[in-house]
Amino acid sequence: MKIHFAALLSVLGLAAAGRPQLSISVRDGKFDGLDGLDPTLRWEASSNAGDVELSYGVEAAARPTTDIASLPRSVWGQARTDVSGWGVTARADVNCQDLNSADVNLDANNEDNDISFKMVARAGGDFNIRRVEATKGLDINGARVTVNPRFNIEDDERDVVIGYDNGDTNVRLTASTDNQEVEINHHTGKTDIRLTASADNQEVRVSQQIDDDNRVAPTINRNGDMSVEWERRLGDDSSLTATLKPNDSIDVEWRDDAWTANVNMPLDGTNIEGANVSIKRDVNF
C-alpha cells in the first residue's frame, strides 16, 4: 500500500476542523529549560458518506522544531456501516515516520446473534494478518457467559477466554496449551474481592470503601509480597491515591480535574531513593 503526501495533507486539513486537545507531559531525564516538556496535539473530526460513518484524526508534537516532518506522529481514519445485520468497522493507523505501512483493524458485530469478530493486520507491501478472535455471548439464568477464542498468528499463539458475570460475581478463565489463569471478582456491600490464580502465582486483593471519601485496598501474593493502596477523594473530579510496596516503592497519583501528577519514589528499606515526577494536563479548545 502506497500513501501519498498529498493524501496525508488532506487528512490533516480535515482533522484540523475538529476541536483539538492538548496534552502536556514531562519526559524522563534531565533537560535544560522547557525541553523536558512533551506537549502533544490531537484532532478528531467526523462526517458521513451515504450510509458510511467516517471519522479521522491526527496526533502531532507541539514542540518548536525546524524539521516540520517530525511534527505529525500518527494519522488514523475509520469507516463504519451496517451490512445485512452486521455492524462493520474498519480502521487504519499510520505512523508518520513510516508511511509505507499501516495498522488495520476490522471489526464485525451482530447484536441479534450476540457474536462478534475482530482482525488485526498490517498493510504495506503485503497484507499480513496478525491476530484474529471471535466472541460469542450467552444469557443463562440471569448470568452472562462469553466464549472468546483468540489466535495470534504473528507469534503462533492461541488461547480461549471464558467469562461469567451475574452482577456481583465475575469470573474470567484464560486457557492455552501452556498456561491457565483464572480471575474472580466479587462485590458485596462496600467490599470488592479479587482473586487471581495461575500456575506461577496467586494473588488476593481486598478493596474496602471505608466512607464516601476513603478507600483502602491491600494486596498479597503467594510469595508474601504485599502492597497497600489508599484513595482519598478531595472533591469533584479530584482524588489522591497512594500505593505502598514495602522495600520497593511509594507511588502517589494526584488527579485534579484535567491535571494528573504521578510521583514514584523507590524504597530501600525505609530510605527513599529519590523521586520520579510526571505531570500531565488535558486542554480542550
Image: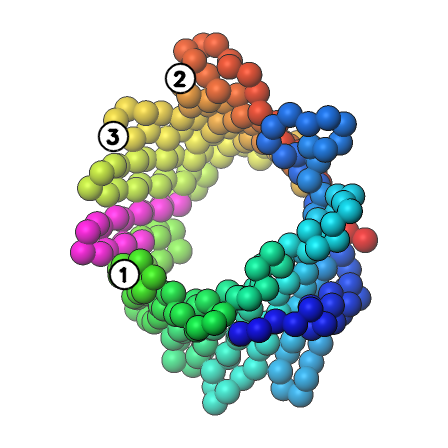
Kindly identify which residue carries mark 2.
247
The answer, for residue 28, to whether it is visible in the render is yes
Q: CA distance from mark 1 to mark 2?
A: 38 Å
Residue labelled with disc 1: 156
Q: Could you say where residue 281 lies in the image, as x and y percent from the top left?
A: 71, 40
The residue that appears at 62% across and 82% down in the rendered structure is 52
Q: Residue 11, position in %: x, y?
A: 71, 69
- Looking at the rendered structure, the secondary structure element under dot 3 is loop
Which callout, 3 or 1, points at the residue further toward the start of the chain? 1
Asked if one can make out residue 60 in the rendered structure from this viewpoint, the answer is: no
Out of 125 and 116, give the one closest to the viewer: 125
Q: Which residue does the image show at 37% across and 30% down from the upper left?
A: 219
User: Is residue 231 depicted above or below 111 in this figure?
Assistant: above
Q: Earlier in the sequence, mark 3 or mark 2?
A: 3
Q: Earlier in the sequence, mark 1 or mark 2?
A: 1
Residue displayed at 69% across by 40% down: 38
Q: Which is in the foreground here, disc 3 or disc 2?
A: 2
Magenta segment range?
172-187
Q: Amino acid at mark 1?
A: Asp
Percent x, y of residue 157 = 27, 59
Q: Main secondary structure of the magenta part?
A: strand
Q: Amino acid at mark 2?
A: Asn
Q: Residue at x 49, y 70 (%)?
A: 124
The residue labelled by disc 3 is 222
Determine contact: label 3, label 1, CB under 8 Å: no
Is 183 within the magenta? yes
